[in-house]
Image (tube, coloured by chain):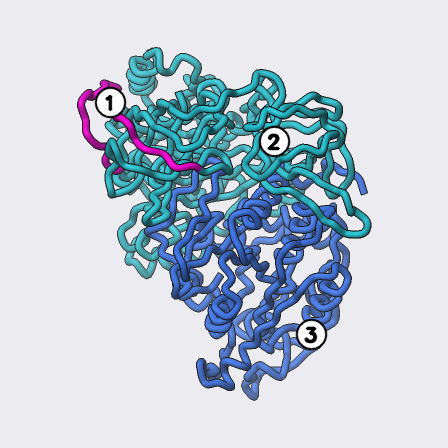
Chain colours: A blue, B cyan
């Protein structure tokens, strides 16, 4: 493979690699938060590049809600196998069984909010001091305010008003015992940057990103994937449609879009002409105007 | 705050949808560069409106986001769409209608990708303005055409100068409220020149553009209300400005971030120095020195995941390998030509960012690039009045948002260049060892 200068601005890759190397140098127990989505797949490639020809010097952590798309889990396991990575999985179901959290009920029940508790207990159990995540500032307005090294207190909380100034490219990772840092190497990338990168790097991604026939039903003007995890009402009819997903979250909170795009070039074309934002199809963000900020305050990544 | 009122016809979703597909489909071109912009301006100068207009006119606001802010504007009882809700993302910001912290906003045109750091106008958040400006290639300074220069304008100009932001664009906004008067515009430009003619601003390039963010005059398209203005509109200026500051003349600096030693069967004896070129360029075969040891060697190879390279330039992340097996570790700096000397005592302009003041005798941790060392403040020689640029002598402390000249004594040497000569190797931050917070930023004399 050669270094090319395509549509993707390579200076963003250089910046991300720099950030990865700072994490490994400044922290003792970093971990990469891996969801199996396109952003975390991009992070894995960047980590490979940062430490090549050495191995990626930290494990991957997946907070498994049990409501994932089966394609994503299959992809996750194949990627870990192929690259010889260490994968740690923590299950939301365990927290439910231990009665630490309780399952939401009703038509819109989702385990999205419960993830935070499992994430925080995984951080505590493994004493992770830096959690690398694939969040981008263009995704959502609370994320637009995020630093690259974002300090969280011992409760995992984000305090937007007390963020450390971050100047030039000097990253200050000094923390007190119990605190941890969330690190966002692709903060300055946009959705289209990620797609152009996936194309130029020829990265494999889960099949649900490409158009495929799927059983769906319509609710609130959105296309929901049918699954055993969702509480459908009697008037909600299941149909088969050709759809794809723009983001990958739980089957209970990720809406699909009707699409014919079954190749990366078509996906890029479709995104360039889309009039709805990436997270416009995320039920978890639509719960309230401050949904993301609230989750971040609670310790979400 | 100036907002988009009902009856301003350009700002409708129907329009947006029409424009969208037409212009955005081929929005990304090849070989584009990224231009990093910081905005500055006083509280009601209309920064959010200007950014909203830039996003709108480049078709960068998705329908659902526009619908969402229309809905929350309605809920707040406003009879217009408050576009500041696009950038003021925190609950506290929306409650108070002000910007507290830097928001990063992204948009593209066929020729370039833009990152805007939208910084707060309030005086008490000046440190966040410095944060936003520190990575900027260009600073947009806004003034209200009715008020002209105000205290914050002086401060922002000074900060842009202090940080050596290569280009400043002054947008004289709300021209619609001064009847698009050329005389008023000229008056303001003249006022600016009384400041910019000051020797401190000698090498700063400044453009002036009369605009109305509300009506989109001279933002993305030429105003027919101001035919007297013959310069470029804002968007054209942003697209044309040279973002890649020439670093050819700068000395080559490579801070070692991480030593790569795989010790695998395949790479048993491999030893590579991973880092990002701070300034200048490196080529295979170049003679280099390693600081602080001063040991010399030659570059054997420059490597990336994708393959080997003959040369690398500033801001590229790479692995550098040397011909000799010498001791190099994180924090060392590989340099060629014009070797920096190790500094154990320095004088610097410092912008203070913490509510606990800086005072002489106090110790901090200094971070220069990736390197940290303990420092002690030996003296504060003066504090700057950012409205008059006068130097106040005999101050005992720098308070939050103060800028002053400080002498520091370092526990171990750093290899910094003067900030005036080398923007990429001349800045540092100060960290409070008790709280671990970043409390100040400094620029080496």
Question: How far apart in space, not on screen, are marks 3 and 1 (Cα)?
Answer: 64 Å
> Can the viewer see residue B440 in this picture?
yes
Q: Chain of mark 2?
A: B
Q: Secondary structure at mark 1?
A: strand
Dot 1: within a 10 Å radius of its alpha carbon, few (fewer than 14), some, or many (20 or more) residues? many
Q: Is residue A188 above or below residue B154?
A: below
Instruction: Tell me where the magenta segment starts and ends, as one range.
Output: B373-400
Q: Is residue A145 left or right of residue B146?
A: right
Q: Position of residue A63 (x, y in %)?
A: 57, 70
Question: How far apart in space, not on screen, are marks 2 and 1 (Cα)?
Answer: 34 Å
Quadrant of the drawing holding the N terminus of chain B: top left
Residue A31 belongs to magenta span: no
Q: Chain of mark 1?
A: B
Look at mark 2 in the image and give the residue it sits on: B277
Q: Is residue B86 left or right of residue B255?
A: left
Q: Residue at x 48, y 25 (%)?
A: B416
Look at mark 3 in the image and give the residue it sits on: A70
Could you say which is closer to the camera, residue B402 or residue B444?
B444
Look at mark 1 in the image and give the residue it sits on: B382
Disc 2 vs disc 1: Cβ atoms closer than 8 Å?
no
Of the two numbered discs 2 and 3 in the rendering, the one whose residue sits closer to the viewer: 2
Of the two numbered discs 3 and 1 in the rendering, the one whose residue sits closer to the viewer: 1
Question: How far apart in space, not on screen, are marks 2 and 3 (Cα)?
Answer: 43 Å
């Amino acid at each position: 493979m050669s270094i090319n200068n395509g549509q993707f601005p390579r200076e963003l890759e250089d910046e991300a690699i720099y950030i990865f190397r700072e994490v490994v140098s400044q922290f003792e127990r970093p971990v990469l938060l891996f969801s199996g989505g396109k952003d975390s797949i991009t992070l894995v490639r960047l980590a490979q590049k940062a430490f090549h020809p050495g191995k990626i010097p930290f494990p991957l952590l997946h907070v498994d809600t049990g409501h994932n798309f089966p394609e994503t889990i299959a992809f996750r396991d194949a990627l870990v196998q192929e690259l010889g990575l260490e994968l740690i999985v923590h299950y939301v179901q365990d927290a439910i069984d231990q009665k630490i959290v309780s399952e939401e009920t009703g038509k819109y029940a989702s385990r999205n909010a419960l993830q935070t508790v499992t994430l925080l207990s995984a951080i505590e159990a493994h004493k992770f001091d830096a959690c690398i995540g694939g969040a981008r500032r263009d995704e959502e307005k609370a994320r637009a305010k995020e630093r690259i090294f974002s300090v969280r207190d011992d409760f995992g909380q984000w305090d937007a008003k007390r963020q450390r100034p971050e100047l030039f490219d000097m990253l200050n990772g000094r923390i007190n015992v119990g605190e941890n840092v969330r690190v966002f190497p692709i903060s300055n990338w946009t959705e289209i940057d990620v797609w152009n990168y996936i194309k130029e790097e020829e990265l494999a991604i889960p099949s649900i990103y490409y158009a495929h026939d799927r059983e769906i039903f319509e609710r609130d003007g959105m296309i929901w994937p049918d699954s055993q995890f969702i509480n459908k009402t009697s008037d909600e009819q299941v149909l088969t449609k050709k759809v794809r997903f723009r983001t990958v979250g739980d089957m209970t909170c990720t809406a699909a879009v009707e699409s014919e795009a079954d190749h990366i070039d078509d996906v890029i074309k479709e995104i360039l002409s889309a009039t709805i934002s990436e997270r416009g199809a995320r039920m978890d963000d639509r719960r309230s105007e401050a949904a993301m900020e609230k989750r971040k305050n609670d310790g979400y990544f | 705050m100036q907002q988009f009122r009902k009856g301003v016809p350009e700002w409708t979703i129907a329009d947006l949808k029409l424009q969208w597909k037409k212009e955005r489909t081929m929005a990304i071109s090849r070989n584009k560069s990224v231009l990093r912009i910081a905005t500055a301006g006083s509280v009601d100068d209309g920064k959010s409106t200007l950014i909203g207009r830039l996003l709108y006119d480049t078709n960068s606001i998705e329908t659902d986001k526009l619908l969402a802010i229309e809905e929350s504007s309605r809920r707040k009882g406003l009879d217009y769409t408050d576009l500041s809700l696009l950038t003021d993302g925190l609950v506290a910001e929306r409650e108070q209608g002000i910007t507290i912290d830097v928001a990063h906003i992204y948009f593209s045109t066929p020729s370039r990708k833009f990152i805007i750091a939208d910084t707060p106008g309030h005086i008490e958040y000046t440190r966040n303005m410095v944060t936003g400006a520190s990575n900027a290639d260009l600073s947009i300074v806004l003034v209200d055409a009715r008020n002209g220069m105000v205290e914050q304008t002086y401060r922002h100009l000074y900060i842009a100068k202090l940080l050596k932001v290569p280009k400043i664009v002054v947008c004289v906004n709300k021209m619609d409220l001064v009847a698009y008067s050329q005389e008023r515009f000229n008056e303001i430009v003249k006022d600016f020149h009384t400041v910019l003619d000051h020797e401190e601003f000698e090498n700063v390039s400044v453009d002036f553009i009369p605009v109305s963010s509300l009506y989109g005059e001279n933002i993305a398209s030429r105003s027919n209300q101001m035919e007297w203005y013959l310069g470029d509109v804002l968007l054209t200026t942003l697209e044309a400005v040279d973002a890649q500051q020439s670093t050819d003349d700068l000395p080559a600096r490579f801070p070692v971030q991480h030593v790569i030693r795989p010790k695998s069967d395949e790479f048993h004896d491999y030893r590579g120095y991973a880092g990002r070129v701070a300034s200048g360029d490196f080529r295979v075969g170049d003679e280099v020195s390693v600081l602080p040891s001063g040991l010399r060697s030659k570059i054997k190879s420059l490597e990336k995941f994708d393959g080997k390279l003959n040369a690398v330039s500033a801001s590229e992340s790479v692995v550098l390998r040397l011909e000799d097996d010498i001791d190099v570790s994180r924090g060392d700096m590989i340099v060629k030509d014009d070797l920096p000397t190790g500094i154990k005592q320095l004088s610097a302009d410092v912008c203070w960012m913490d509510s606990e003041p800086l005072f002489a005798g106090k110790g901090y941790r200094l971070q220069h690039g990736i390197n940290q060392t303990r420092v002690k403040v030996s003296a504060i020689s003066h504090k700057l009045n950012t409205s008059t640029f006068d130097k106040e002598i005999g101050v005992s402390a720098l308070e939050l948002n103060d800028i002053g000249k400080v002498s520091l004594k370092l526990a171990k040497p750093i290899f910094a260049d003067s900030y005036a000569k080398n923007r990429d190797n001349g800045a540092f931050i100060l960290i409070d060892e008790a709280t671990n917070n970043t409390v100040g930023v400094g620029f080496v004399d």
